[in-house]
Image: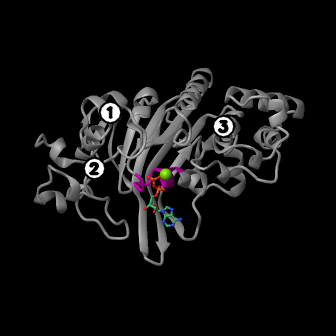
Amino acid sequence: MALLSVQNLATYFYTRNGVVRAVNGVSYDLEPGETLGIVGESGSGKSVSCYSLLGLIPMPPGKIVSGTAMYNGLDLLKATPKQMRDVRGSKISMIFQDPMTCLNPYLKIGRQVMEPLIEEGVDKKIAYDRALKALDDVGILDPEERMKQYPHEFSGGMRQRVMIAMALVTEPDLLIADEPTTALDVTVQAQILKLIAELKQRKNTAVIFITHDLGVIAGIADNVNVMYAGGIVERGTTREIFKQPAHPYTQALLDSIPSTHAHGERLFNIKGLPPNLTQEITGCPFAPRCKHAVDACYVTETKLANIGEQHHTACFRFAGGEI
Ligand SMILES: Nc1ncnc2c1ncn2[C@@H]1O[C@H](COP(=O)(O)OP(=O)(O)O)[C@@H](O)[C@H]1O
Ligand SMILES: [Mg+2]
């Protein structure tokens, strides 16, 4: 049985400039122990689709307008604050892009890393030892001293490590990592990815890994959801996505990976811009940027079609063997 089953999730933001359809009908299953990579350009709905699962969407302006997200028999989208508190921190942990979203500037680091364990009812002494080990695991030197310090005494990279320690200390069933390595140098990145892989091995933890870096995905993900303009345009095993990308958008993403793996600007250099999400989109949202687009692409509603046992594409031309 799936650990998490997301069906038809849609999250909109009602802003002064119109309704932003940030996530528009996303469905997928995640198995225990699976690592799912979510890739797509900035603004494609990667973060919002995951924040929606954990009650982290600011409402207003946000609203979850449809969907279910079943996790251990609980619909996360309808969870009470108490149910959500129980799930978060112990069963599902999240690593954010910005560490300050989850660190309290007024509390000592040690207390914060111990907190999710204390919440679970773990004995204080044991919680202390586990927090110490978690900080050591993420490469924080002199963790005993560091536990007595406040977030402002840590550099950006160090705060990121603290947040990762906080997320891993409870050994969750599901870890959602939102571009966790973007701000870290390459060595630390590798170390963090190794830690996540170890936890997976030991605890069969499932991981949702959000990134704009397809190179990172290749190394760790079992399956990949490719997102564009709030929807999944392709889903498949990592192998299939790399060997036989079945959506022109995925192909463009792969083409835009620089051969010498440099970080930054050169990733995702696809001509044109993603659509304005406040405007109703008819047809395929990628059509205006797609080199294979024909008239029908602008009017045919897209939906994911099976092209292999576990491979789906929203491109009807690809699914129909036209490209
Ligand atoms: N609080 C908000 N108010 C209005 N629009 C938002 C808000 N948060 C996110 N969005 C919009 O939702 C869309 C998806 O954002 P996001 O999920 O953060 O993209 P990604 O993580 O793929 O870069 C973007 O167009 C973004 O501007
Ligand atoms: Mg994001």
First to last magenta residue range: 42-50
Percent of width and height locating residue 17: 43, 76
- Seen in the picture, residue 72 relative to 62 is either above or below; the reply is above
**Distance from Cα at disc 3 to Cα at disc 1:** 35 Å
Q: Is residue 215 left or right of residue 199?
A: left
What's under tag 2, amino acid-wise? Ile
> Which residue matches tag 3?
161
Where is residue 80 drawn, in percent x and y? Answer: 67, 57
Residue 270: mark: 2
Q: Which residue is mark 1?
A: 310
Mark 1 closeness class: few <14, some 14–19, many ≥20 residues within 10 Å: few
Mark 2 or 1, closer to the camera: 2
Q: Is residue 260 left or right of residue 132?
A: left
Please name the residue shown 78% across and 39% down the image.
120
| Label 3 environment density (alpha carbons within 10 Å; few <14, some 14–19, many ≥20) | many
Observer-nearest of 90 and 125: 125
The one of 68 and 195 positioned closer to us in this rendering = 195
Q: Based on the displayed image, in which of its 4 quarters is residue 173 positioned? A: top right
Query: Relative to the observer, which residue lies in front, 137 or 32?
Result: 137
Considering the numbered disc 1 on the image, is that residue within a helix, a strand or a loop? Answer: loop
How did the renderer colour the structure?
one colour
CB atoms at circles 3 and 1 under 8 Å apart? no
Distance CA(mark 2)–CA(mark 3): 32 Å
